[in-house]
Amino acid sequence: MFRILVTNDDGIDALGIKRLTEALLTLEGAEIYVVAPVEEKSGVGHGVTYRSALAPEKHDFYGLPVKAWAVNGNPADCVKSAYYLLFEDGHKPDIVFSGINVGTNLGRDIYYSGTCSGAREAVLLGIPGIALSYDNWFDQENYGDVVQMIQPLVSEFREKAEKRELPPNVFWNINIPHVPLNQIKGIVPATLSLHHYEDKYNEEAEGYFLTREYPEVMPLAEPLDYDLVKHGYIAVTPVHIDATDREFLQEMGEWSFVKEWGKRED
């Protein structure tokens, strides 16, 4: 039996995680478990809970044929809980899907996103992890044709995970445009668009609230995830969790403090 773990950052009662689970239930021979935050945890990054106790509780999940738990923690806590606490038979998840998030997680969003942290935590534990986000921030109750859109994606990731063909230390960040299925232009490997918005703080009575300003949609010139989604493509980005700049590591050998202090004898 192929065991799939589903999590998110919008909370276990969110519509997006239901849609993701519906797509996964079409996979033959899959055993689905849902472990998600009891409440919304958007923007928590890769935060983990250690100053208070986690208490996973069984949860009815839309009447679907899955086993589900709600966790009083963050998405990374949910994946950790599933891995260390919830599977008494010792069979760990074979793959983790996180989402479907309300709104995109593009470019540097991967560092803030709880959705991405669920997939990243899976990879840290040696399990393939896939994060999915949908560009419906301004139409949050409408998931359109997203189930049909992601079926070929989840099917191929499941197949590659079974064959152990997915690279280690990589999670996959998938962003889906909010258009009808017949308007999807393709599914494209994408790079991160690290500078596609500017942070702004708006002053209100309670203080300052963080907002973003996005550029006008420009002609598609590079395979950047933001541009691809805005032009109607599903963007799929492999994100390596080892952020070491190995090329520059060699150059640092010429820095003065390395030469003087780098290799001192005991």
Image (cartoon, rainbow, N blue to C red):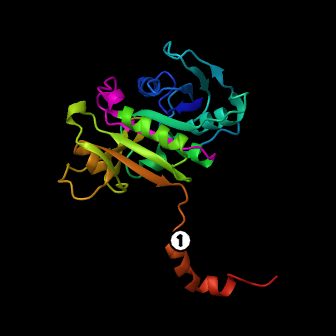
Residue ranking furthest to the right: 266
- Write down the quadrant of residue 181 in the picture: top left
Q: Quadrant of the C terminus?
A: bottom right
Is residue 43 something that shows in the picture? Answer: no
According to the image, label 1 marks what residue?
A: 246
What secondary structure is found at the residue carrying circle 1? helix
Query: Could you say which quadrant of the image residue 224 lies in?
Result: bottom left
The residue at the far top in this view is: 63
Boundaries of the magenta span: 125-149
* Residue with the most extreme left position: 219
Would residue 204 be visible to someone looking at this image?
yes
Please count the marks in the image.
1
- Residue 229, compared with residue 181, is above or below; it is below
Q: Amino acid at mark 1?
A: Arg
Where is residue 238 shown, x and y percent of the image?
44, 52
Q: Residue at x 42, y 32 (%)?
A: 100
Q: Residue at x 48, y 26 (%)?
A: 28
> Does 143 sit left or right of 245 as displayed?
left
Q: Residue at x 39, y 43 (%)?
A: 174
